């Protein structure tokens, strides 16, 4: 292990850790980890240095980022389903979460970065509620459980996405230390 690899690992640890914080705020932190690894790989190629990562490591990090996204969306839908939502409620939770994250970023900008998280959770709940309301066969008060399930599932999915990102981060730092 050279001083150069130790510095690279430290830089990757700090920047990758920042990306993980962004993931917790429902921003694309895991994808930024992928871009960070690709950027370092490109820098090493351009500088004529040994490549810090193998193609397999880069592919694994990208696959983990994709798996994290799918888990986050899927768990929001599963939470709505566990709360009693049917098809429209489940799709409402997924779409509402996306719209809510975007709206939260803009409308709740006075809550730095956390507005996105609040928007995503509220969007999942509102989307599930509206989706279930379109059936017209239940009272609005009985739709609170699917809405709460959607928000809880979305939050659980965020935690799984964070854990997947942490695994990618460990691969990134470890790959920099031991090329």
Image (cartoon, helix red, strand yellow):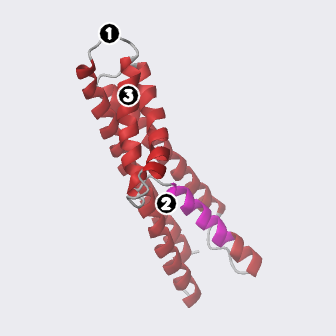
> What residue lies at 40% left-to-right and 58% top-to-bottom?
110
Is residue 105 a member of the stretch shown in magenta? no
Disc 1 versus disc 2: distance between alpha carbons?
45 Å
Q: Residue furthest bottom?
A: 3
User: Over which residues does the magenta segment extend?
Assistant: 28-41
Tag 2 residue: 168
x and y, in percent, of residue 36 in the image: 59, 67
Disc 2 versus disc 3: distance between alpha carbons?
31 Å
Tag 3 residue: 128
Q: Is residue 114 left or right of residue 179?
A: left
Q: Is residue 178 visible?
A: no
Q: Nearer the viewer, mark 2 or mark 3?
A: 3
Q: Secondary structure at mark 1?
A: loop
Question: What type of secondary structure mainly makes up the magenta span?
Answer: helix
x and y, in percent, of residue 58 in the image: 61, 60
Q: Are discs 1 and 3 less than 8 Å apart at CB? A: no
158 or 60, nearer to the observer: 158
> What residue lies at 50% left-to-right and 65% top-to-bottom?
171
């Amino acid at each position: 292990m050279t001083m150069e690899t130790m510095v690279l690992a430290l830089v990757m640890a700090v920047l990758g850790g920042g990306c993980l914080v962004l993931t917790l705020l429902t921003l694309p932190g895991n994808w930024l980890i992928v871009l960070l690894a690709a950027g370092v790989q490109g820098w090493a190629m351009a500088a004529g240095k040994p490549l810090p990562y193998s193609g397999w490591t880069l592919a694994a990090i990208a696959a983990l980022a994709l798996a994290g996204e799918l888990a986050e969306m899927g768990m929001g839908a599963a939470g709505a389903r566990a709360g009693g939502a049917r098809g429209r409620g489940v799709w409402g939770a997924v779409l509402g979460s996306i719209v809510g994250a975007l709206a939260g970023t803009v409308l709740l900008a006075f809550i730095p970065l956390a507005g996105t998280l609040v928007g995503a959770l509220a969007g999942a709940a509102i989307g599930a509620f509206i989706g279930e309301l379109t059936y017209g066969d239940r009272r609005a008060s009985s739709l609170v459980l699917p809405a709460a399930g959607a928000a809880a599932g979305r939050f659980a999915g965020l935690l799984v996405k964070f854990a997947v990102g942490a695994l990618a981060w460990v691969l990134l730092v470890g790959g920099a230390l031991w090329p």
